[in-house]
């Protein structure tokens, strides 16, 4: 927190903090996966996450004194200091920490914190039942979804609670124009006639790291192309397969939308293949991707100087 490694119970902010009052912060979620055979925690695509965090910071006029590479080093050092040899979840947050009254972004001081804690599955990965939300996805000209802005996730919270309180596992959100956008905190893919279809960046989606991973793996491993385009609500009902994806959700097949079975109501073959491959990749079991995407934690690299 602000350049120091400290016990989590000392990582506190004032009740007058600007980000607490107004949501003026941005964050990332980064997973680390434990590989028992290697006795190693691999952080998955950490650099890409931090590059996105810095883009979010630019949008919010937040300045932090680290590069993406330095943030990766700080992350590996934190997990090492915690002695974590398990699946972990890292939450970096850059935020406005001034203790002032007044809604603005400029001339407000900034701060940074990072936590690492054990984490299993965020959502059920064996088959989700989803409902299309009555809450519309925020628009780029309201709160840009391509930045992971803390306050924007109230929009997701409305949709998630509505879905769960209506008996579903997860929500699917539409744009103001009525096109499919994403889940409450996940990107969405449809499988139609052997192709992957996913909403385009113009549909107010977060440009997900896992989304990009799926597109690359599908092309490289299975020769499947991905079409990025507008998707109508009723296309969900007749898709061959649907799955959600994200750092938290990983790859989570959808078996039902609005009480309509997707396919035969079971995890489809494409979703299953991608899910199996994804878990091998993130745990460093595929050398060609390990070298490209996985950062080992328990090594001789020493980032202690950064504190």
Image: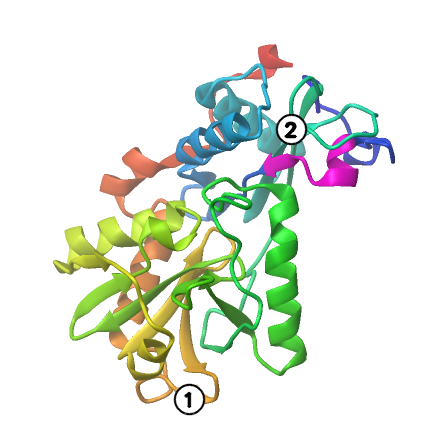
On the image, which quarter does residue 75 sit in? top right
- CB atoms of marks 2 and 1 within 8 Å: no
Q: Earlier in the sequence, mark 2 or mark 1?
A: 2
256 is within the stretch colored magenta: no
On the image, which quarter does residue 198 sit in? bottom left
Q: Is residue 117 visible?
A: no
- Is residue 82 found left or right of 129 in the rendered image? right
At which x and y percent is residue 121?
54, 61
For label 1, count other residues whose C-alpha is less than 10 Å away and answer few (under 14), some (14-19) or many (20+): some
- Is residue 241 found left or right of 40 in the rendered image? left
- Give the residues drawn in magenta, as a range: 18-26
For label 2, count other residues whose C-alpha is less than 10 Å away and answer few (under 14), some (14-19) or many (20+): few
At which x and y percent is residue 265?
37, 87
Residue that sits furthest to the right in the current view = 15
| Vertical comparison of 237 with 122: above or below | below
Q: Which mark is residue 235?
A: none
On the image, which quarter does residue 235 sit in? bottom left
- Between 53 and 269, the one lying in front of the other is 53
- Is residue 194 found left or right of 14 in the rendered image? left
The residue tagged 2 is 81
The residue tagged 1 is 260
At which x and y percent is residue 261?
39, 88
């Amino acid at each position: 927190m602000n350049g120091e490694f400290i016990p989590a119970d000392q990582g506190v902010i004032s009740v007058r903090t600007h980000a607490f009052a107004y949501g003026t912060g941005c964050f990332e979620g980064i997973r680390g996966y434990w590989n028992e055979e290697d006795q190693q925690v691999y952080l998955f695509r950490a650099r890409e996450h931090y590059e996105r965090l810095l883009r979010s910071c630019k949008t919010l006029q937040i300045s932090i004194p680290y590069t993406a590479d330095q943030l990766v080093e700080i992350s590996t050092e934190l997990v090492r200091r915690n002695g974590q040899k398990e699946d972990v979840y890292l939450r970096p947050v850059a935020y406005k920490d001034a203790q002032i009254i007044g809604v603005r972004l400029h001339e407000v001081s900034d701060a940074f914190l990072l936590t690492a804690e054990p984490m299993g599955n965020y959502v059920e990965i064996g088959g989700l039942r989803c409902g299309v939300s009555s809450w519309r996805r925020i628009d780029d000209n309201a709160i840009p979804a391509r930045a992971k802005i803390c306050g924007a996730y109230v929009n997701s919270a409305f949709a998630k609670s509505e879905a769960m309180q209506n008996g579903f596992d997860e929500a699917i959100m539409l744009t103001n124009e009525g096109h499919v956008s994403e889940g409450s905190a996940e990107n969405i893919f449809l499988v139609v006639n052997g192709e992957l279809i996913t909403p385009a960046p113009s549909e107010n989606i977060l440009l997900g790291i896992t989304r990009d991973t799926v597109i690359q793996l599908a092309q490289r491993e299975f020769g499947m192309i991905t079409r990025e385009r507008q998707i109508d609500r009723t296309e969900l009902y007749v898709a061959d397969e649907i799955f959600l994806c994200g750092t938290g959700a990983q790859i989570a097949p959808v078996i039902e939308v609005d009480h309509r079975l997707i396919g035969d109501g079971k995890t489809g073959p494409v979703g299953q293949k991608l899910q199996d491959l994804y878990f091998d990749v993130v745990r460093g079991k595929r050398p060609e991707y390990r070298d490209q995407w996985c950062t080992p934690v328990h090594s001789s690299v020493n980032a202690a100087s950064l504190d």
